[in-house]
Every structure is written in C-alpha cells, then in structure tokens.
Image (tube, rainbow, N blue to C red):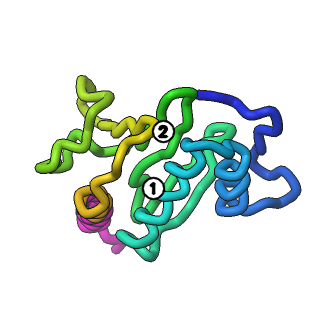
Amino acid sequence: MEKSMSDPKQGDGGASPSQLIDARIQELSDWRGEMLARVRSLMKQAEPDVVEEWKWRGVPVWSHAGIICTGETYKSAVKLTFAKGASLEDPSGLFNSSLEGNTRRAIDFHEGDKIDEKALKALIRAAVALNISVQTARTRKKPKSA
C-alpha cells in the first residue's frame, strides 16, 4: 500500500477514524482521493449506520456488525476489499480482484473508471445483511447461563 509522507497513525492527536479518512482523501489530492471519497459517500448512502474505522497503520475500514470492506490506496488503484466477499452474490460482476481466495473479494478502481453506483450499493447492503446474519447465528448458538 502506498504510504504518505504524513501517514497518520491511530491515536495521533486523538483524531477520529473519520478525520483520518478525511485527511487521507485530502492527502491523495488526485483521482485516488476523489475515488475514495466517492466510494465512502456511496458506503454511507447504502448503510447510514456504517462505522468508520482506521486500522493497520492507515487503512480506512467500514463496518456494521463486522467488517464490510477496507479501502486501500495504491499508485494505480483504489481497492475495496470485502471481508466476506466470496460469500456474496455479485450479479453485476463488480469483483475484479482477489478472486482466488475462499473469503475475501475485491474491486480495483483505476483512474477514469466509472462506478456502477447501484450495483456497489447493493453489494454493500448484501455485505451488511451477511454480517448481521452471521452475528445473529452466533448469538443464537451461545449457551444460556443457568
């Protein structure tokens, strides 16, 4: 992953994850920042209760009942990696990276790419629904204390 000159770390100055993501978008100051900002906006439209996190020394993470996806930035791509992407239906064929694994799937956006906003929001909603169903199943399996 491309590191910035002022790579914000967790806890720097008490900045919130959302503020750190704002800073990353501004720092990129090119098509990657614009793409990350657009994807972030679509994430919030698709799931208004999304939680923004900042993990692994500078990776934006969006969660709801578990990780939905990460938003990594590279020199030639903005990569959205869906934590449980292999378990999601992708009728629009958005996944174009990390297709060989058993768990994750990713979408690489390159300069000039158009986002299929409707399909991406559907994928985000499907990831949230999967997270909720997994969380619910775990809760049901826990033995009750006597």
Q: Is residue 9 or residue 112 the one in the foreground?
A: 112
- Which residue appears at 55% of the width and 42% of the height? 32
| Label located before the other in sequence (2 or 1) | 1
The reply to whether the C-beta atoms of the residues labelled 2 and 1 are less than 8 Å apart is yes
- Please state the horizontal and vertical placement of residue 46, each as a whole percent of the image: 35, 69
* Res 108 quadrant in image: top left
Q: In this view, does 22 lie above or below 77?
A: below
Left or right: 102, with 68 as reference point = left
Toward the left, the furthest residue is 91
- Which residue appears at 27% of the width and 43% of the height? 85
Toward the right, the furthest residue is 13
Q: Using the image, tell me which numbered label, if any, was put on residue 39.
A: 1
* Res 73 quadrant in image: top right
**What span is in magenta?**
126-146
Which amino acid lies under the numbered mark 2 shown in the image of this protein? Val
Which amino acid lies under the numbered mark 1 shown in the image of this protein? Val
Q: How many labels does the image show?
A: 2
- Please state the horizontal and vertical placement of residue 5, each as a whole percent of the image: 81, 33
Q: Is residue 99 or residue 37 the one in the foreground?
A: 37
- Please state the horizontal and vertical placement of residue 93, each as a whole percent of the image: 17, 42
**Residue identified by numbered label 2:** 78
Q: Is residue 97 or residue 13 the one in the foreground?
A: 97
* Res 122 quadrant in image: bottom left
Q: Is residue 141 magenta?
A: yes
